[in-house]
Image (spheres, grey):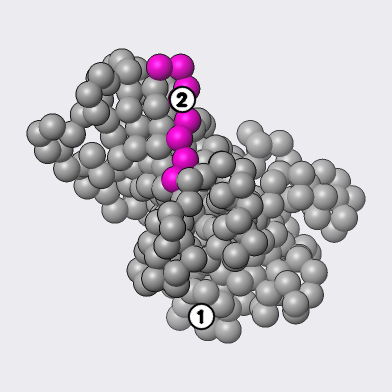
């Protein structure tokens, strides 16, 4: 949808739409291609409620942010597309600038709350009297974000787990922090093995879990990184054969579990 405006974030954290000649750079409202665009496969829509400056304590949500990661052939994130809607504004706007801001600025990030589609639909109905547009329609409003940095995985000899065709390691990096209750819920949901030092403030690995899907095996760890300023999910994938069709839905499901506890996915990388 050409000509649509783009959400930006002013110095005060307010989502705004600078006018031409204001001296504020406005990103071009490039719209993402369809569900299987040239950049790769699309990962499914994520929804956030947007509160006024100050976060949930400053007032009820008045906007909705919709995002979707685009992945390359090896399931690595290559782009983040997004669109936003604010009560009283005419329609949806590209929101790549706002999406980058919530990952880089804790103050802006404090204004959003991850929800399922039902939660976004409920807010849209309350504020407009009508339901949220269908996913296909929302994808038509997504503004294409800039390319995410990627690099080829480091391949070293002897990395494949014995008995398997291929072994890969993925890392999903998150902004925000897990609360103690959120971490406990994740550990319970995944029936994680918890290290003896998990209660120590400097502990890095907070739990390990395993899953078999067909003949493939998945092992993952929840980790603190950057001195606890961020969190990640490290997933080791042991593939029994050449097909990796099961990788994307498993990574999507694991990411969604952490997102429900308030973490905001930043990117997905492949280490090996």
Quadrant assignment, res 169: top left
For image coordinates 10% across by 34% down, the residue present is 157
Left or right of 130: which side holds 55? Answer: left
Which region shows up in magenta?
Answer: 208-215
- From this view, report whether residue 36 is shown above or below residue 92: above
Give the residue furthest to the left: 157
Residue beneath the point at 73% across and 41% down = 133
Residue at image location 80% in from the left, 69% down from the top: 60
State which quadrant residue 52 falls in. Answer: bottom right
* Quarter of the view holding residue 153: top left
- Could you tell me how far apart the alpha carbons at marks 1 and 2 are, in whole angstroms? 55 Å
Closest to the observer, 6 or 265: 265
Quickly name the residue at label 2: 212
Residue 17 in percent (x, y) is at 59, 70
Q: Nearer the viewer, residue 20 or 36?
A: 36
* Residue 148 x, y percent position in the rendering: 34, 52
The residue sitting at 58% across, 84% down in the picture is 12
Q: Which residue is mark 1?
A: 22
Q: Is residue 214 magenta?
A: yes
Element at badge 1? loop
Outermost residue to the bottom = 12
Tell me if 126 is positioned left or right of 91 in this view.
right
Say whether disc 1 or disc 2 marks the residue closer to the N-terminus.
1
For the C terminus, give its image quadrant.
Answer: top left
Vertical comparison of 52 with 270: above or below: below
The answer to whether one can see residue 85 in this image is no
Helix, strand or loop at label 2? It is strand
What secondary structure predominates along the stretch shown in magenta? strand
Q: Can residue 253 be seen? A: yes
Report x, y in % for residue 118: 76, 44
């Amino acid at each position: 949808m050409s000509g649509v405006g783009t959400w930006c974030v002013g110095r005060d954290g307010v989502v705004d739409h600078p006018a031409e000649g204001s001296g504020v750079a406005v990103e071009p409202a490039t719209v993402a291609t369809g569900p299987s665009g040239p950049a790769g496969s699309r990962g499914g829509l994520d929804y956030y409620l947007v509160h006024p400056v100050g976060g949930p304590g400053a007032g009820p949500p008045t906007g909705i942010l919709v995002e979707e990661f685009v992945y390359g052939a090896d399931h690595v994130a290559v782009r983040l597309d997004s669109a936003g809607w604010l009560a009283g504004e005419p329609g949806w706007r590209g929101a790549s600038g706002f999406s980058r801001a919530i990952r880089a600025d804790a103050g802006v990030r404090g204004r959003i709350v991850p929800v399922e589609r039902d939660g976004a639909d409920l807010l849209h109905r309350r504020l407009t009297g009508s339901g949220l547009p269908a996913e296909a329609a929302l994808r038509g409003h997504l503004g294409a974000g800039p390319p995410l940095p990627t690099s080829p995985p480091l391949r070293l000899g002897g990395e494949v787990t014995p008995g398997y065709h291929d072994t890969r390691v993925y890392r999903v990096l998150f902004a925000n922090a897990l609360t103690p209750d959120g971490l406990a819920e994740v550990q319970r949901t995944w029936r994680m093995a918890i290290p003896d030092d998990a209660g120590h403030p400097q502990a890095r690995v907070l739990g390990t879990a395993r899953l078999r899907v067909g003949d493939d095996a998945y092992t993952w760890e929840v980790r603190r990184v950057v001195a606890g300023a961020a969190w990640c999910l490290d997933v080791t994938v042991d593939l029994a054969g050449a097909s990796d069709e099961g990788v994307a839905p498993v990574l999507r499901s694991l990411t969604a579990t952490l997102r429900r506890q308030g973490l905001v996915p930043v990117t997905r990388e492949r280490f090996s």
